[in-house]
Amino acid sequence: MRTAATSFQFLLSLFTNLYAVWVIAASILAFLIPELFRWFSGPWVTWALSVIMLGMGLTLSLADFRKVWEMPRPVALGFVAQYTIMPATAWTIARLMNLDPPFAVGLILVACCPGGTASNVVAFLSKANVALSVVLTMASTILAIVMTPLLMQIWAGHYVPVDAAGIFKTTLQVVLLPVMFGVFLNHRFPRIGEKASSIGPAVAVLAIVMIAGSIVARNVEAIIGQGPQLALAGFLLHAGGFALGYGVTRVLRFSEITARTISIEVGMQNSGLAMVLAGQHFAPPTAAPAVFSSVFHTLLGSLLAAYWRRNRPAEANCAGQGGRAAASLTSSVEGHPRRSIHYWKCDRPAAFHGTTERAEAGAYESQLAEVLRKWRPEQTLALQPAGGQGNHITWRATAKGTDYFVRIEDGPERDDYIEVESRILAEVRGLGVPTPRVFGVDASRKHAPFAWQVLEHIACPDLNQIHKEGRLNLAKAAGEIGAAAARWQNVTTPGFGPFDPAVLRSEDRLEGFHPRYEDYFFLHLQRHLSFLAQHGMLTAVEAEEIRAEIEHHRGLLALEQGFLVHKDLALWNILGTETEIAAFIDWDDAVSGDPMDDLSLLGCFYDGKVLAHALEGYASLRPLPGQFRRRFWLHLLRNMIVKAVIRVGAGYFDRDDGFFLIHSGGTGQTLKAFTHARLAAALKGLREDQEIETL
């Protein structure tokens, strides 16, 4: 059952993904009935492109600009390739095909424009470096105010007079100013950026479609005479851009992932800007090549994405390969505490650290204040303990009317997973799932004996609190949670289990520690079962039955691909109101694993009726995987084993209903009985392949 919000987002996503179809349809319609689009000209076209650029700015943060200095070599290569390969290729095609001057200038104009924003989506689908893609698009777009008029003067000046100053002024007005205004709004009013990001891509598609239709409608006669020639020229330009961008990068010995990213950035152009500049500074037919460009760079980019998605980069394809690939997976993780754990709270060397109530906030507050002064010397941040019940010590920080949420990790293992979590928050938010923005993070412990993270403060309670008060429509919320899980499972990575922070720092991508999923799944299973038997949570017979049943279903763990799993999905890790989810939080246990894992985590707390709504929400966006029921029960059983270990070891069964896990009026013993019953239900469900609704 889709909610209205889920259906709306689904339709927006579908509309955006069919971008090339709408451009082709609008072009055909404009060709057949020009009057439908001729009105959309002049200021309409200019404003449409400005809206697209504003939308791009709203997706950027100041941290994106800092990334330019974090990966200077690939950024420099991508920028140079963008503004040399494409103009030279366009000029060569125009000469070899003997294009009429207006069309030759139009083709060169497309090539002299910056990278298209759709390249970021194609980079994601292609298993390329999305962060590098965003930085390259941003850099080429901002510097287009100089590069586009300069390159047009060089490459097209012998065809027609080029008004370089006029092109500079127009590019400044319709590109740089809207982008920077969007960045300002996103920095000063981040909630605006959050809301706009959900509809921005669809608005951009609509704007490009209208611009393309307008150009075709005003150049019907020229297209009739030169259509096949322009189509061939557009195809050759972008095919050449993709091929040369990839080839040059590999010749210079950059990685496969970087080569894919630069190939996409070079091959995909901002054809909307070319249409606007052609309409304002050149003869009308000059805009026609931009229409064909829009179609071909989208189609070719989509085909490349489909091919590359099925053929992962060699340096990332470690799962099941053994030999050198497996060695590359393990070489950087030797000794890292996350490599040898199944679940951090109970398996970390300092087991159960942070799971009991504590009052160390005051001891760290002065050190944290000093760290934050160095981070933001222009602001004075007032700290107030936030009193969280999770792994971290938390504060609310306020400066100049803006609130932040601050967390520190003070464990003796010197864990740096908070950096991984920060990356995951950004990736998930980019897929349209609300998460807090990360403004700062440092796990180096160079200036303090803890890792710290500064997040956007979201002024909403968690859904568990609303549920305890009887105000939450749990069925509706479950459907939205299931749909959100389907979205974040678009993040797929090599390897399984927790992600390697060293790979993230060195290669700017996520990769699991383990080459096989079952290697991660079985970590500490026997130790967990023995612990529960020793503490009377299970009998020895029950523990052995569970172990044998899990072993019997080992074949379900033979995954070829890992999907992003939150790994602590529950109402207390979701902020919002009675009617809306504001953010999914606490991704510090996230792993690469089975698509049913997160839904099984909901089964650790809620019944089959709730899970039915979550499954429907998930299935509204993504098909349920094969043998989904048994996979659900298998993961519910493994997760309940972990939950039981934590609840026993951290003394949760001695708490009252003020504790987040215990419902109103309940006790620790109520929680203990529920935990044992849920273990038994998961075992029975797995053994008998029961319907999930029976839970």
Image (spheres, helix red, strand yellow):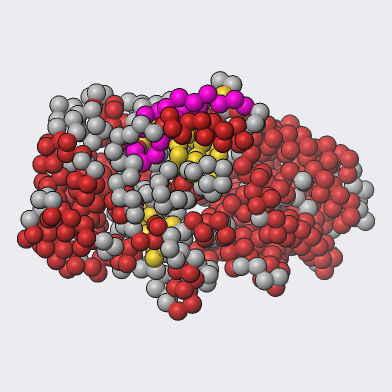
Question: Residue 285, how many percent across, how many down?
Answer: 79, 49
Q: Quadrant of residue 168?
A: top right
Question: Residue at horizontal 46%, vertical 34%?
Answer: 364
Q: Quadrant of residue 154?
A: bottom right
Question: Residue at horizontal 66%, vertical 28%?
Answer: 378
Question: Residue 42, how many percent across, how many down?
Answer: 75, 34
229 relative position to 302: left or right: right
Taking depth in this image into account, of 447 and 459 the one nearest to the observer is 447
- Residue stretch rendered in magenta on the structure: 379-397
Confirm whether residue 91 shows in the render. yes
Above or below, comparing residue 155 to residue 580 in the picture: below
Question: Residue at horizontal 77%, vertical 34%?
Answer: 173
Question: Residue 290, how many percent across, how many down?
Answer: 72, 51
Q: Is residue 384 magenta?
A: yes
Above or below, comparing residue 344 to residue 55 in the picture: below
Q: Pick the quarter of the image with the N terminus.
A: top left
Q: Quadrant of residue 627?
A: bottom left
Residue lying at the far front of the rendered structure: 363
Taking depth in this image into account, of 264 and 583 the one nearest to the observer is 583
Q: Is residue 332 magenta?
A: no
Taking depth in this image into account, of 610 and 66 the one nearest to the observer is 66
87 relative position to 688: left or right: right
Above or below, comparing residue 110 to residue 96 in the picture: above
Question: Residue at horizontal 57%, vertical 54%?
Answer: 130
Confirm whether residue 457 shows in the render. no
